[in-house]
Amino acid sequence: MLKASLNSIQRGAIIAQDVYGNDGILLIKRGTEYRETYAPRFKEAGVQEIFIEPSGELTKESVAQIRQSLNIHDVVQEKTRLHAQNQIKKTMLRFKTVTNSDIQKITGIVEEMIEQLLEQKDFVFALSQLRSVDDYTYQHSVNVGVLALIIGIDLKLNRVQLKDLGTGAILHDIGKIMISEEIIKKPGRLTKDEFSEVKKHTLFGYEILTQTNISEEAAQIALHHHEKYDGTGYCWGLRNTKIPLYARIVAVADVYDAMSNDRIYQKKLRPDRVYREITHLGNTHFDTQIMETFAKHINIYPNGTGIILNSGHRGIVLYQNKLYPESPVVRVFTPNEQNFRKMYFDLDLSMNTKWFIVDTY
Ligand SMILES: [Fe+2]
C-alpha cells in the first residue's frame, strides 16, 4: 500500500483503504478504481492523500509516483535545464566555432539558473533524471554548470563571478569539438596516442573561447579543469592554488557528474561509491575545501532513490539522517504480503545495524 497525493495518482489505481472525509463520512470504499473525477470531491472533504495498492511488483510508474509524493524536485527547473542542453548541443554541433551570440545565450541561461538556485534554502543535488548515452556530453555539460554554481554560491562568489563560473563550466569541454568522434566515443580503453589527443581538448577549448568575448577567467576553466591539486593533472601540471579557483571548482563537479552517470566506456557508480571516491580524492585531486563544500550538497542516497537491502528487499529512501548519511530512513516493500496493511514498513537504517543498503535501482 502506498500513500499518494491526489495529484499524482493515475487513473485505474486501486484504492487500498476506505477513504473518509474530515466529517467522518465514508467517501469511497477500499478496492475501488481511482478516477480523476473523484479528486474535487475528495479535496472538498479535506482529503489530500489516499492509500493505493502498489500494482504487483514495483513498477517504474509506482516508484515515480512515490517520488512525486516525496516532493523531490530538481534544483533547477526542467525547462531551464533543457533549454541549456539544447543550446550547448547547437553550439557543439556547429562546425568548430563558438560565436559571441552562443556565449550570450548560455550566459542568459546561467543567470536563470543562478536565480533559481538562490531561491532555495537548502540545495541538495538530486540526480533524478535519467540520461541517454547519446546526449551524455550535453547533459553532462549542463550538470557541471549547475554543480559548479552550487559550490560557487556556497563559497559566496558574487553574481558577476557566478555568471562567469557557470558559463565557463557549461563550456568546459567545448574543445572536444576539435577531436575526432571516433576517439571521443571509443567504448574501450584509449591507447597512449589517443589519450594524448584527448588531453588536447583543454588547449583547444581555451583557444576557441579566447576568440569570443567570454572573460579570461571563464576561458581558463576549459584550459585547467583537468589539473589536479597535487600537480599530476594536465595540461600544465599546475598545483595547489596555482590552479585558478573556477577550474578547481569545475574539477570536482566534472568528476562527480562523470562518475554518477553511465558513460560510453564505463557504467555509473552507486551514489555511495561516488561519494566515497570523491571525498577520498580530496587531498590529491581536489582542493579539500572545495570538495568539502561540495559534499555538503549531495546526499549519498537522495530522497526517492530506489534501494536494495542486504535482505534482498526493495525500498525507497524517505528521509535523510543528517549525522548518518549512509543510513537514511527507508520504506521497505513486501509485495508478496497478502495482508495489505503489511505491504510495506518504514525503517530507520541508522537504528538498525542488521539492515543496510547494498545497491540502488
Ligand atoms: Fe574535460
Image (cartoon, rainbow, N blue to C red):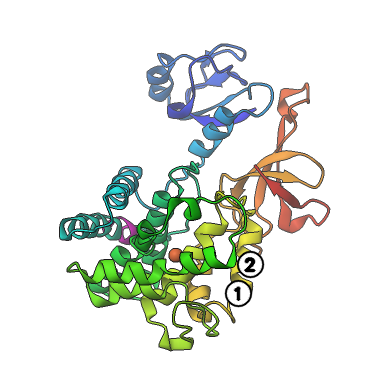
Which residue lies at the image location 69% right of the left edge and 57% below the top edge?
327
Answer left or right for 65 relative to 118: right
Between 129 and 214, the residue placed more toward the observer is 214
Percent coordinates x, y for residue 13 in the rendering: 55, 18
Residue 47 seen anywhere in this rendered image of the structure = no
Q: Which mark is residue 331?
A: none
Mark 2 secondary-structure assignment: helix
Mark 2 and mark 1: span between their CA atoms?
Answer: 6 Å
Residue 113 vertical placement versus 33 (above, below): below
Callouts 2 and 1 close, C-beta under 8 Å = yes
Percent coordinates x, y for residue 226 in the rendering: 47, 72
In the picture of the structure, the residue carrying the numbered disc 2 is 277
| Ligand 1 lies in quarter | bottom left
Residue 149 vertical placement versus 94 (above, below): below
Answer left or right for 339 relative to 47: right
In the picture of the structure, the residue carrying the numbered disc 1 is 281
Task: Magenta stretch: give its range.
Answer: 115-119
Label 1 Cα crowd, 10 Å radius (few <14 / some 14-19 / many 20+): some
Mark 1 is on which residue type?
Answer: Leu
Mark 1 close to ligand 1, CB under 8 Å = no
- Rendered-image quadrant of the N terminus: top right
Percent coordinates x, y for residue 8 in the rendering: 46, 29
Mark 1 secondary-structure assignment: loop
